[in-house]
Each structure stands twice: as C-alpha cells, then as structure tokens.
Image (spheres, rainbow, N blue to C red):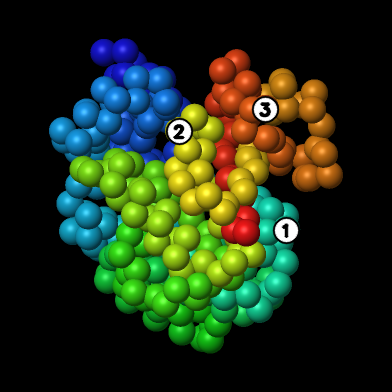
Amino acid sequence: MEAKARCEAREGDDRSPKRASLSRTVGCLPRLFSWRGLRSQKRNVKGGSLGHYGNGVAYWDARYKKDSCGHFDWYQNYAALKSIVNTYIPNKNARILMIGCGTSNMSEEMFLDGYTDIVNIDVSPVCIDYMAKKHAKYKGLTYVVEDVCSMKFPDQHFDAAIDKGTMDTLLCEDGSWDAVRQMILQLDRVLKKESSLLEITYGEPSARYHWLSIPSTWDTTIFTVAKPNAPRVPAAEAERGGAGWPAKIRQYSFREAKALEMARDLKDVHFVYGSRKR
C-alpha cells in the first residue's frame, strides 16, 4: 500500500496524458531501486515484471502503431539539454549513439545544431522504419534496429552516447538488474577512450549512480534540470546558484546530490548523469 501511495502521489509529475498509463509503475522506481533494502528488492524484481514493458519489442511495436508514431520526447527536449550536450560532446563531427531513440526529435534537433553523425537505435522495427523515412533527407542520421544490451557494433566505435529513458524502461522489465548491467557493459565496450555518456532520467542518485560506477574507467558528474513547467526551483538549488550553467541546470557531486535527495528537495527536477570514459 505504501508503494502504491507513493506512485499515486507522483502521478502529477510532468507526464503527458500519453504517460498516464505508465505513471504508477514508473513513479515507484526511484525508491524501489535505492540501496536501502537492496537484497530483498532484488528478489522482488527477479520474481516478476514491474510494469508494461515485459513483452519488450511486442509492447513497443504495438504502442507505436497505436500512436501512429507521432513525435514524443521523454523528460526534456534538446533545447533544455543543449548546454550539457555541447559540453560533453564539443566535437560536432563525433560519432554519437542515440540509445532507444523512439520518436523523439532529439537527434533531428542536434543535427540541425551542427552534429553530423548520429546513429539511432531502438528495439522496435516499427519505430525505426518510421524514423528512417521521416529523416531520410538528413544524411547524418542513421537508424538501426538494435538492442542496447546486445549490440553488434565493433569495440570502441562511438565517441559519445546519449540515453533518454532507456535505462528507466529496462528497470521496469523482468530480469531488469541483468539487463541494465549488460547495457552498461555494452556501452563501455562500444565507447572509445575519452568518450562521453549522458544518461537522462528521473532516477535519483541512489537509484542510478551505482550502475554508472560498474566500469572503473568512468567518471560521473550529476546535473539536475528543472522539469518543464516545474512550479519552483528547489530551495537548496536556488541558494546554490547557477555555477556557470543556465538557470534551470545545477551541477553536483554524488555526495551533494545525495544530501538533497535525503532532504526530499529534488522532486521538481530530472537528472543528467554525465560520464567521461578514461
């Protein structure tokens, strides 16, 4: 009952009507995947599906067909993330992997901003076929049906990778712990040395940071980005100031972000975990 109440309390977050059917499942995950009670929670995950995604490709194909593959951006658009993307991927000719691209406009907007080589992957053939046709005129955007947990790309193939919600989705499926671990190991394999990964998520530090610590060669910084139409900037962030970033973006170490999380002062933000591979 406590978990259900938490989920219902979070239904008013920045989710559009399209997300309403997912809100109960998604809203629970940041707390469920914290370090507290890790052993018992892991058993619960192994024991059954946490949401609608257990059917994998079948679920997403059906969803894209139902929605007629209309545009949909999870969490934040490129305009809100541009300063972080430009900082972590300063070379506009970098080969970038866009993980779980869906029908987001992120890659198109990055291409129009000067990025020349973005490889978009998704498990849904319906989605990839639609997006490849939609962006056929953009020669720098390619679309491939691919599973981030078992990619066929060569080792050290990409200069950067961006994920906006794929890890969150995997954490809703059966076998989620194994899937996310495989995702991280695969990204470590296909990313070059001195490359970057941007993980964009609603997941708080205690729910996400440990996954990005699996590769010993990744150094990760945490950013918060105010949710669209958030009623306020959290008090602790307002006091901190911009630190050189746009007004809605703040940068933290893990310890600083964890302190804000414990103070429950992060409900109006999304998180960007910026990792650099040594």
Q: Which of marks 1 and 3 is nearer the N terminus?
A: 1
Q: Is 240 placed above or below 169 here? A: above
What's the residue type where badge 3 is placed?
Glu
Q: Residue at x 22, y 29 (%)?
A: 43
Q: Name the residue under label 2.
A: 207
Please tell me in which quadrant of the rendered image residue 45 appears: top left
Dots 1 and 3: beta carbons under 8 Å? no
Q: Name the residue under label 3.
A: 256
Q: Name the residue under label 1.
A: 87
C-alpha span from label 1 to label 3: 21 Å
Q: Residue 242, image x and y in percent?
A: 81, 37
What's the residue type where badge 1 is placed?
Thr
Q: Callout 1: helix, strand or loop?
A: helix
C-alpha span from label 1 to label 2: 25 Å
Locate the N terminus and report the quarter of the image it occupies: top left
Relative to residue 86, is residue 190 drawn left or right? left
What's the residue type where badge 2 is placed?
Ala
Structural crowding at the residue carrying mark 2, measured as other residues with C-alpha within 10 Å and reported as few (<14), some (14–19) or many (≥20): some
Q: Residue 98, image x and y in percent?
A: 48, 65
- Mark 1 or 3: in front is 3
Q: Nearer the viewer, residue 4 or 145?
A: 145
Q: Which of 174 and 13 is in front in this view?
A: 174
Q: Residue at x 21, y 43 (%)?
A: 174
Please say whether residue 219 is visible from this viewpoint: yes
Q: Residue 187, image x and y in percent?
A: 45, 61
